[in-house]
Image (tube, rainbow, N blue to C red):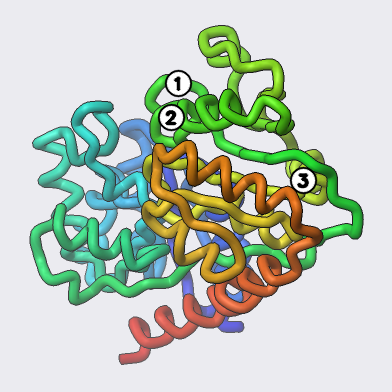
């Protein structure tokens, strides 16, 4: 612990994994938190940079890139976290900041000029190198960490398939593969599916089959209950960086099934099933197999071994130490 080291922590919104990094940094350093957006945010950055030794930003964006510019102006160090959406470019869905020519110029600068860039998966590092058009010599892979003390299994599993995806618009509906989930549910009418995260507006627009039960977003305590009861967790994504909900479900002993995109195969490893996106026959076969399984301690062990909070904490401390003491 070195409270003499001062860190400016920035993001434009908050998630559970962003909060986990904030907790890690706050336990070891003196942290100034700026989680906001809007023009006033830039003035807040400029005032705060001078008082801190290092900036730590979640997601490549116009905000983090301008922050990195001023960090260099004031001779400070910077760490940028790539989470996945920030290196996405799907023109047909207008998904990703890289579809904007002027934003892509600014974000390219931020990625190339941050002192250290930490990508949550090798696939994200590769995407960043392609989009930013350089060799990625400042990009390193560091996956998110997950709290195995909170996300714990119980011994009773029920015969249903769970998917958790924040889905409040059509683009998210497609990116998270919910259309694929709908098709799979139609082909398995005797299997009970549960989808959490579908907004009430989206539920009205896309009516599911009778065997697909849908809910809006749930609290972490409620999610824990669903994870503990579900026998199978299905990640049907068209694009996914790593899949925090997939990791949480695996810690709770769900048998994992996911598409072969992004970091999903890395997360699942040998503990579950990987299927081609859109292949309903393969999905149906693996779901049927998964429902015949019991509590998956192998899935839990996979996350505890490769995606622990403790590992991420130590690596973050190491990178900060190297930057400030070299």
Give the class, few, some or many, for how many residues have Cα within 10 Å of label 3's Cα (few <14, many ≥20). Answer: many
Of all residues, the one furthest to the top in this rendering is: 204
Asked which quadrant contains residue 85, the reply is top left
Badge 3 is on which residue? 230
Q: Mark 1–mark 3 contact, CB under 8 Å?
A: no
| Residue drawn at the location 44% of the way across and 48% of the way down | 11
Quadrant containing the C terminus is bottom left
First of labels 1, 3 by sequence position:
1
Distance CA(mark 1)–CA(mark 3):
26 Å
Using the rendered image of the protein, determine whether residue 252 is visible from the camera's viewpoint: no
| Residue drawn at the location 28% of the way across and 33% of the way down | 95
Badge 1 is on which residue? 169
User: Dot 2 lies on which element?
Assistant: helix
Marks counted in the figure total 3
Badge 2 is on which residue? 172
Q: Which mark is residue 185?
A: none
| Residue drawn at the location 25% of the way across and 58% of the way down | 68
Mark 1 or mark 3, which is nearer to you? 3
Asked which quadrant contains residue 99, the reply is top left
């Amino acid at each position: 612990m070195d409270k003499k080291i001062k860190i400016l922590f920035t993001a434009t919104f908050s998630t559970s994994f962003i909060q986990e990094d904030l907790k890690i940094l706050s336990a070891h350093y003196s942290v100034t938190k700026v989680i906001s957006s809007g023009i006033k945010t830039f003035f807040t950055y400029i005032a705060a940079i001078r008082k801190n030794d290092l900036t730590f930003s979640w997601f490549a964006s116009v905000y983090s890139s301008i922050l990195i510019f001023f960090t260099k102006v004031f001779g400070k160090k910077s760490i940028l976290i790539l989470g996945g959406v920030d290196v996405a470019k799907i023109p047909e869905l207008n998904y990703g900041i890289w579809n904007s020519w002027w934003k892509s110029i600014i974000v390219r600068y931020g990625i190339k000029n941050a002192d250290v860039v930490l990508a949550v998966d090798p696939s994200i590092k590769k995407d960043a190198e392609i989009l930013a058009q350089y060799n990625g010599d400042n990009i390193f892979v560091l996956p998110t960490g997950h709290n195995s003390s909170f996300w714990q299994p119980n011994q009773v599993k029920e015969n249903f398939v769970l998917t958790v995806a924040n889905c409040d618009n059509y683009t998210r509906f497609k990116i998270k593969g919910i259309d694929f989930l709908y098709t799979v549910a139609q082909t398995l009418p005797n299997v009970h599916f549960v989808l959490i995260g579908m907004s009430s507006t989206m539920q009205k627009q896309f009516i599911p089959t009778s065997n697909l039960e849908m809910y809006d977003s749930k609290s972490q305590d409620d999610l824990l209950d669903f994870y503990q009861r579900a026998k199978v967790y299905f990640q049907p994504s068209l694009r996914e960086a790593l899949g925090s909900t997939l990791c949480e479900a695996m810690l709770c002993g769900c048998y994992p099934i996911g598409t072969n995109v992004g970091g999903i195969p890395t997360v699942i490893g040998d503990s579950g099933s990987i299927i081609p996106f859109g292949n309903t026959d393969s999905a149906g076969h693996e779901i049927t197999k998964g429902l015949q399984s019991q509590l998956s301690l192998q899935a839990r062990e996979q996350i505890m071994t490769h995606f622990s909070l403790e590992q991420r904490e130590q690596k973050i401390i190491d990178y900060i130490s190297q930057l400030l003491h070299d």
